[in-house]
Image (cartoon, rainbow, N blue to C red):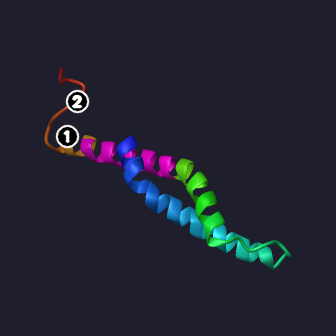
Amino acid sequence: MARIAAVLFPFGAGAMAVNVFFASLIGSWLGGPVLSALWSILIGAVIGVPATWAFARHIRRLMDEANARADAEQGRCPERQG
């Protein structure tokens, strides 16, 4: 699962950076500061770690479920294999 998370991290961190930047834009309507691109990227990288890890766990679960379904369709039962 760590490999999946490592591959997905740039996308997760990028998505979080965009979300942080847009949240700061909305916050500026209330008088808050607009974050610079650098701060948005840094904060996005930090909060991207748990977000990417959770998404990687979800993807791994879906892969395991698909493998189990494929094994069942082919008549293989993982519990009986030794």
User: Would residue 60 be counted in the magenta stretch?
Assistant: yes
SS assignment for the magenta stretch, majority = helix
Left or right: where does residue 63 sit relative to residue 23?
left
**Picture mark count:** 2
Q: Which residue type carries mark 1? A: Asp
Residue 77 lies in quadrant = top left
Residue at (49%, 52%) from the top-left corner?
Answer: 52
- For marks 2 and 1, the one nearer the N-term is 1
Q: Position of residue 61 (x, y in %)?
A: 39, 44
Q: Which mark is residue 60?
A: none
Question: Mark 2 — residue?
Answer: 78
Q: Is mark 1 on a helix, strand or loop?
A: helix
User: Are there few (<14), some (14-19), or many (20+) residues within 10 Å of tag 1?
Assistant: few
Asked if the residue at tag 1 contacts the one at tag 2, i.e. Cβ–Cβ closer than 8 Å, the answer is yes
Q: Position of residue 38 (x, y in %)?
A: 62, 67
Left or right: where does residue 11 sit relative to residue 69?
right
Question: Mark 1 — residue?
Answer: 71
Residue at (55%, 55%) from the top-left corner?
Answer: 48
Q: In which quadrant will I find the C terminus? A: top left
Q: Which residue lies furthest to the right in this view?
A: 31
Q: Is residue 45 above or below residue 30?
A: above
| Stretch of the chain drawn in magenta | 52-67
Q: Position of residue 35 (x, y in %)?
A: 70, 70
